[in-house]
Image: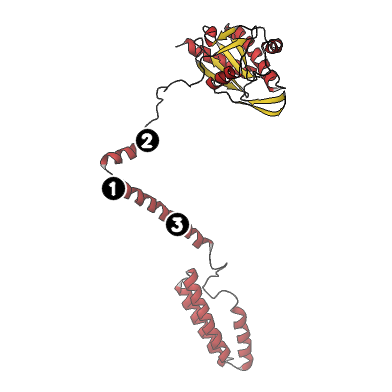
Amino acid sequence: MATILRQLRTKSVQVLHNQTMSYGVAPRNFAAQSRWLSSASKSSSAPSGAGATTGRKLLSDTAGPPPGGRSVRGGPVSWASLGLLVVTGVGLITYYDREKKRRIEGSLPDAYRVNLKRGPPEAKAGPSVGKAAIGGPFKLLNHEGKVVTDRDFVGNWTLIYFGFTFCPDICPDELTKLAEAVDKIEKKIGVQIVPVFISIDPERDTVEQVREYLKEFHPRLVGLTGSVNDIRQVAREYRVYYMKTEEEGTDYLVDHSIIMYLMDPNMDFVKFFGKNYNADGLTDGVVEEIQKYGKK
């Protein structure tokens, strides 16, 4: 029994020492447990009955905390040590950032150092560089068969749309929207907009075809067509994309950009409006640009 108790004492002392190093248990607890284990080992010299009883009591007591000590729960990382690690890490990162900034500022000239403290200069709106290169001279035939040029529209606000009469859905929708906006603008501010439709399908859109097509939309709607070269030129002037697709003889569609161009009374480009504008949005957008123009 004495041999077993000595081995148990030696093993317990080693375990307690390791716990002290890992968890920071107070040294006085370590000393108290050592004295307790030492006194327990001396009791092995008692009579066998008493010794057996004492030994059993000692073995059962070793499962709990030593007298005057404290129990250590959890694994090798406690909440306290984890919190200390986080706080230390944040402190080190903050110190590193401050030191890095101080060293960088210290290596810069005085003028640069002042600018860093003031921050970036406030952004200011600069002057406009110029107008978009959209629009230009053209010479076409209107839906009455008369030759017209871009100069014939000077003095009026104009909304120009490029499309083709065989368009199944998009062009009719856009021209309906254009007609509604023209009437709403006139009621709102008393300005008569000249709506213009320019065909990008000159091979099929003859003067007669365009005239019949426009009757469905607005009485003031002007239709323009011309030769293949004339249409190519005006499309280039207004940056309009168009291309035949699914061609089978005379039965084909034309893929094209869906844009309305607002031109001022000098036939200079002001703004374009895409398919995402409805009739009310188109009305408000045109009215806004006309009001801006009047304040110049």
Distance CA(mark 2)–CA(mark 1)? 19 Å
When the figure is inspected, residue 295 is found, relative to residue 120, above or below; the finding is: above
State left or right for residue 2 relative to residue 216: left
Mark drawn on residue 89: 3
Which is in the foreground here, disc 3 or disc 2?
2
Q: Which residue is mark 1?
A: 107
> Which of pointers 3 and 1 lies earlier in the amino acid sequence?
3
When the figure is inspected, residue 117 is found, relative to residue 212, above or below; the finding is: below
Q: Secondary structure at mark 1?
A: helix
> What percent of the width, then of the height, locates residue 29?
48, 74
> What percent of the width, then of the height, locates residue 76?
54, 68
Q: Nearer the viewer, residue 177 or 78?
A: 177
> Which of pointers 2 and 1 lies earlier in the amino acid sequence?
1
Which is in the foreground here, disc 3 or disc 1?
1
> What percent of the width, then of the height, locates residue 258?
62, 23
Q: Nearer the viewer, residue 225 or 32?
A: 225
Distance CA(mark 3)–CA(mark 1)? 27 Å
> Which of pointers 3 and 2 lies earlier in the amino acid sequence?
3
Q: Which residue is mark 2?
A: 120
Numbered circles on residues, count: 3
Q: Nearer the viewer, residue 63 or 242?
A: 242
Q: Tell me the residue at 65%/12% (across/down).
A: 179
Q: Nearer the viewer, residue 115 or 152?
A: 152
The kind of residue tagged 1 is Ser
Q: Secondary structure at mark 3?
A: helix
State left or right for residue 112 relative to residue 23: left
When the figure is inspected, residue 55 is found, relative to residue 65, above or below; the finding is: below
Q: Disc 3 vs disc 1: Cβ atoms closer than 8 Å?
A: no
Q: For the C terminus, give its image quadrant.
A: top left
Please rate how many residues cluster around mark 3, counting C-alpha atoms within 10 Å: few if below 14, some from 14 to 19, many from 20.
few
Q: Tell me the residue at 64%/7% (across/down).
A: 145
